[in-house]
Amino acid sequence: MVLGACGAAERRAPSQGQNGVRAAGYDLEVVPFDFELGGRKVSSWGYNGGIPGPEIRLKEGETLRATVRNRLPEGTTIHWHGLPIPNEMDGVPDVTQPPIGSGEDFTYEYKVPVSGTYFYHSHVGMQFDRAVYGPLVIEPQQESLSYDREFTLMLDDWLDGIDGTPEQKLESLESGGSAMAGMEGMGEGMEGMGGTGEVPRQWPPDVVYPFYLVNGKPPESPEELRVNRGEEVRLRLINSSSASIYRVALQGHRMTVTHTDGQPVEPVEVNALRIGQGERYDVLVNAGNPGVWQLAAQAEGTKKIGRALFRYGGSSASPPPADFEPPELGKKLLLYDMLTAAPEAEAPPGGEPDEVVPITLNGDEEKYIWTINDEVFSEADPIEVGRNRHIRFEFENKSMMPHPMHLHGHFFRVQNGTGRGPMKDTVLVEPMQKLTIDWLSDNLGDWAFHCHMIYHQESGMMRVVKVA
């Protein structure tokens, strides 16, 4: 198996971790650094002076020991997105730990409980809209998929140092509203819109970014994924963007979806994916069409594209234009109702839930305030649930924006009408849509639950779920 894209982090020699389990040690220095983007010198923050941060890769059952050395002028943390780990290691400031102070070090250490595609990122303020993120790949003890080559691809939207700073953008939204301001009346008569079986429409984004990146590279100077004819290629797609949903397609090829949010699903073949902020999809591509092809991630509601190039060995053809839209973007799109969990996926108990929690998502676009159950995070009490209970969250999105809702510390089943909906940790809830998820509250602690569109999260759309 050949690996590609996203260089690995500096890994220390293996040692003994908790309870004598083999430990994989990594050093992550979060620092201000400069890099070139679109012909301009950009100053930002990131891990080990790169974008994205280094890939962390280890096996299920190993212990991850990661020392974070904070060289920023403010506090920071790392959240290990999607992994159901001990609460004190989850990296949410003032919920699971105090921020790591400027000039201080902190070591995260935990046994990795599941395999899959994940990522890590800061959970402090607007830091996530910089380069403080990186891929986290957990290999299974025994790989069930057969493939010859793999690439990890991180999708990102970029404005820091080009169009002000993330903090300035948030201030602008809060003072002037979003692109959706004044559109409240559009919701009338649309209660069924955006169901799991319907092709979602594209909505104007709150922020249109100057650049959309794949592995830190703009479309004018894309990363090349080099493959050979006849190979089976695994792509690990991670949406590490702060505010953008993408539609992803590979020109001249179809994709077989095998995992969502790290959890296995029954394979389904599609032309295009829709991937919300914080979501991940693993796909297999059969390399049977030699040439140079556009792997495009089109930001929803715009014509802008992030891209990589799929180049076969021996091909010297010129690449497509940077803004080329593969026709596959308009063909068969993956929908949640096409997905069924594989038998080996983590799963909550069946039957009726022990507790049902209504979750209303709403917002005032003009004031740029976003709420869960009509409360902003700073004024809300925790959502309290019992331990080892079958919990059902019944979402109702009353706003005119899609919200990628992420629950820390647990997987949940998306109820999509199949009886075996996919297991995920992040789900897109469409405007005016009702959607249900079920999960088992088997991980004690105070867990963040929020919209993974960072500007919505920072403007109130977050709660703490207390499992006790």
Image: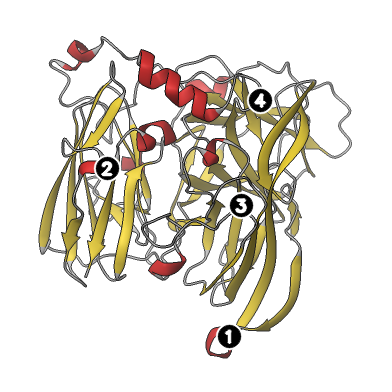
Q: Amino acid at mark 2?
A: Ser
Q: Amino acid at mark 1?
A: Val
**Secondary structure under the numbered disc 2 in the rendered image:** helix
Query: For residue 38, what is the image quadrant?
Result: top right
Q: Amino acid at mark 3?
A: Pro
Spatial separation of the CA atoms under disc 1 and disc 4: 43 Å
Is 342 or 170 nearer to us in this picture? 170
Q: Which residue is mark 3?
A: 135
**Mark with earlier residue (4, 3):** 3
| Residues at marks 3 and 2 touching, judged by CB atoms closer than 8 Å | no
Quadrant housing the N terminus:
bottom right
**Secondary structure under the numbered disc 1 in the rendered image:** loop
Spatial separation of the CA atoms under disc 4 and disc 3: 23 Å
| Residues at marks 1 and 2 touching, judged by CB atoms closer than 8 Å | no
**Secondary structure under the numbered disc 4 in the rendered image:** loop
Q: Which residue is mark 2?
A: 378
**Mark with earlier residue (3, 1):** 1
**Secondary structure under the numbered disc 3 in the rendered image:** strand
| Residue name at image x 58 percent, y 17 percent | 304
Left or right position of 102 against 198: right
**Is residue 290 positioned above or below 207 on the image?**
below
Is 301 or 12 nearer to us in this picture? 12
Query: For residue 458, what is the image quadrant?
Result: top left
Left or right position of 387 against 170: left
Q: Which residue is mark 1?
A: 21
